[in-house]
Amino acid sequence: MSALAEPRGPKPKRISLARLGIHAFLIVVAAFFLVPLWVMLVTSFKTMNEIRLGNMLAWPADFTVEAWYKAWSSACTGLACNGIQVGFWNSVRILVPSVIASIAVGAITGYAMTFYRVRGANALFGLLLLGAFIPYQVFLYPLVRLFSSVGLYDSLAGIVVVHVAFGLPLMTLLFRNYYSSLPIELFNAARVDGAGFAQIFRHVFLPMSAPIIIVATILQVTGIWNDFILGLTFAGRQNRPMTVLLNNIVNSTQGEAAYNVDMAATILTALVPLTVYLVSGRWFVRGIAAGAVKG
Amino acid sequence: MSLSAPATGRPIARRLRAKLPVLLALTPAIVIGFVVYLGAMVWTVRLSFSTSKMLPVLDWAGFVQYDRLFATERFILAAQHIAVFGALFITLCLVLGFLLAVAIDQNVRGEALFRTIFLYPFSMSFVVTGLVWQWFLNPQLGLQQTVRGFGFSDFKFDWIVNQDFVIFTLVIAAVWQASGLVMAILLAGLRGVDAELWKAARIDAIPTWRVYVSIILPMLTPMLATAAALLAVSVARLYDLVVAMTKGGPGLSSEVPAKFIMDNFFERSNVGLGSAAATMLLATVVVVLAPWFYAQQFRKRRGRA
């Protein structure tokens, strides 16, 4: 999969009509992909008076960052007007423990399933994979009942547990595939030296896991940050993540909508995964490939 | 290899002691697999055969909830919408993703930039996607008004508030979000094609498009299937995008099953009906994905042998 770097394919034959066509196609599609982002950006820097004029593509005549301040610190959801920052910090508080815990559990599960042939481990893996393909709606109601009966419902701990549970299939898959690609002699040698389950993991495989941990982190950070339905259902009022708050800000406005504030809030919410994507670049693609192609 | 099954023939106590940490490590996975996935799933199916309204009751009502479900217009509409959405969304994503991957594979200038542009929407959430497109397609101030401002005063594009067309706006937004994923998967496949194949095709003077259609496309089938499976999963899950972009409206014209289920569970206190709808969704997903799952296992087994 690392061959993504060097383009192969057929050698181009100088400039031909076909090559012009290919470039034109790519540019048109790129415009389709970029226009919404452009509109979102310029709208967030306009005043509402200018927005009402109706040219959404135009560069702001009266450039202002006021909408961004409002979106961050004073946009309203219902009666509370504390801006999207509340959701930002909630998302951070959900994200950090969820990412760490789900990767830790996934790594240990993947390690155990790769090197220790426990009876039924393959069936368990199959069950997890199957669970990954089934829509959340099939599980949500019983889980809500279960969580409220053990006091996890509407709490930070609850939403973290939910993220670990629904992240486990992909995490296990990643680590299982990664560990299977390593030479088994590593494991055998450590075994001969008398190392146990935890020791082999800590001293042999964990230090070798950096690449796959990076991939897993990228996948989990974007996935958990972008989650809406689980946060909406399990996090409770105090911990509503940024996506839920954003939707409330935009879709429950009374009176005329402040589109500039809405768009600023939307960009702010997209900023974390977008940054992860732009900074991580090839790693992001690797994560998709590892999760999808081998799945 | 013999060491990976090390304890054979040794005393039982020792074997148990060796197994204990492994079992401990697998405990979270076992609990999640059997309680969160299997348990919750079975419970939902069970509830669909009960009279549960606001709270779950475990009586036996036969197929009453299913009779009600199929007499509920809202659910029938939701099922029709998701069928239209799913067919269009998956087809368009695969076609666009394939074309983009092939185009990018032609040693184009600025390849990395194009790749970045085509995949960035995939890193954003469905909520963000929905809100952006809701604003972009807003008839009063969005695309329609902007094009009219350019002098095309008759231009009409009010799909997002039009009962007959709103579902297509969801398709557009979702294709925008997800076709980069297909491109990335297929591009990885294209880069794995042996350079010898291209040499051979050139020696035989086979036109490039012909190679793509007759040789490359069949080689990419497993990846296309995987991409289609991933897209199908997101179709069944379609909820966030609808909530953010159209709230299921206007009227019921963009209602979808996942939203129907959530509303019945958590807002309308119709647990039995929601469970029946969830069970139908589950059955559909299993039926659609079973062939793919089977082919995947088959391929793996053959690969190992």
Image: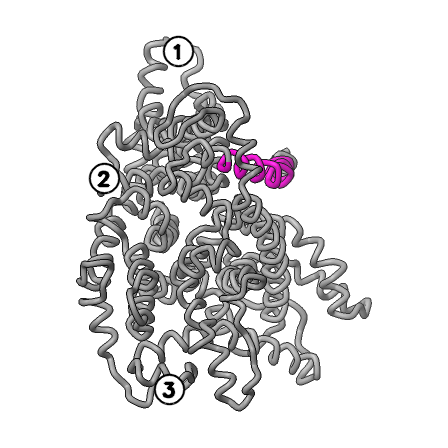
Task: Let me know if residue B241 appears in the view.
Answer: yes
Q: Which residue is mark 2?
A: A157
Name the chain under label 3.
Answer: A
Label 2, label 3: how far apart the Cα atoms are: 45 Å
The answer to which quarter of the image holds residue A81 is bottom left
User: What's drawn in magenta, residue-wise?
Assistant: B277-298
Mark 3 Cα shell of 10 Å, populated few (<14), some (14-19), many (≥20):
some
User: Marks 2 and 3: which is nearer the front?
Assistant: 3
Q: Secondary structure at mark 1?
A: loop
Query: x, y percentage for residue A227?
Result: 36, 51
* Rendered view: B146 above or below B167: below
Residue under the point 46% across and 69% down: B116
Q: Secondary structure at mark 3?
A: loop
| Residue bearing the label numbered 1 | B10
* Front residue of B116 and B76: B76
The three-letter code of the residue at mark 3 reads Trp
